Amino acid sequence: MSVSVILTCHNEERFIVQAVESVINQTASGGIREIIIVNDGSTDGSTEVIASLVDREPRIHVLTTAGIGPSSARNLAIRHATSDFIAFLDGDDFWAEDKLERQLTAFGNGCKAALVYGDLVDFSAPDLSDAVPVAVGRYRADQHDTLPTYFLLDGPIVPSSIVMRREIIEDIGLFNETIRVGEDTEFCMRVAERWTFQHVAGALVYKRRHGSNTTRRLDALLPVAEHLTREWVIRRPELAHLARRRNARLYAKAGNDCVAQGEKKRGARLLIRAILHDPLSWRVYVYIFLCALPAGMEPQVRRAAKLLFYRVMRKRLC
């Protein structure tokens, strides 16, 4: 099995070397046919840094674009890819050393899923001192409710964790180039409509948070996410009964994110909207409790609660 690795880079001068080295140093590096880097309108020193990487690694091919966005950048690279499997990596993330080995093993064991993905580590500090393991929903290749479950839970299957069969592109099409944020969720919706997913246990990706992340403000993504809800209810009416619960989760996550960033009033308003969508969601009331904590206590309790939540999730999903 050969893999084409697609990296997208937009002003990731500080991070792109670590990202590329995490690909080159894979335990399954021998299965990587090519590393396609799309340098999408970078105005920092990314171009020079990428050029130095090309000198070191002959499998790297560079495509230079003028800020066309993640969907168009990935699509361009997919059109140039020559392998049967495609893996994605954002230029500010990096892979665990055995990521590809574990995923290719899953495919090699007869997995019929369209894509294989896994858990992640959320961090912002360069030394990983604030790293939090994140357990994501665990889909199986033999699952029959992939679409409604993914519609309700809204991920998180992050692109940097995905290895997918090239043939699904021929089946469902490329990323939607009219969407500049949330394009990965929309793509996975279309995959889930016709295929299944397979989860591989353990963190595969280190997902970096920094001031330039497109998804750094979850509340800014709400209009796109709600539009996606409406579109898919029209497309698949059997999902209509899940729409309010889906939107409640979206508002709850955005409200919690605002509170975590010190915007308690806006966070509280969003959490109230979540309750109006789904009064029975226990998650919302946990977030409201965190919102009500005194300012000095809230960050420590929030981190402890986050660690506990993901620990419980890992046990439930085992």
Image (cartoon, helix red, strand yellow):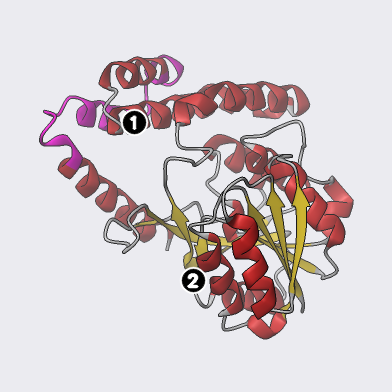
Q: Main secondary structure of the magenta part?
A: helix
Q: Which mark is residue 138?
A: none
Q: Nearer the viewer, residue 56 or 242?
A: 56
Which residue was labeled with disc 2?
Answer: 96
Question: Height in image: 231 above or below 211?
Answer: above
Instruction: Tell me if mark 1 has few (under 14), some (14-19) or many (20+) residues whose alpha carbon lies within 10 angstroms of its own.
Output: many
Residue drawn at 35 percent across, 21 percent down: 271
Q: Is residue 90 visible?
A: no
Which residue was labeled with disc 1?
Answer: 256
Where's residue 270, x and y in %? 38, 19
Where's residue 195, x and y in %? 75, 52
Residue farthest toward the right in the current orientation of the protein: 170
Q: Is residue 175 visible?
A: yes
Residue type of the residue flagged with mark 1:
Asn
Q: Which of the marked residues, 1 or 2, is nearer the chain's N terminus?
A: 2
Q: For the residues carrying marks 1 and 2, which lies nearer the camera in this image?
A: 2
Question: Height in image: 119 above or below 158?
Answer: below
Q: Mark 2 falls on what kind of element?
A: loop
Residue type of the residue flagged with mark 2:
Ala
Tell me the quarter of the picture where residue 83 sits.
Answer: bottom right
Whether residue 307 sits left or right of residue 33 in the image: it is left
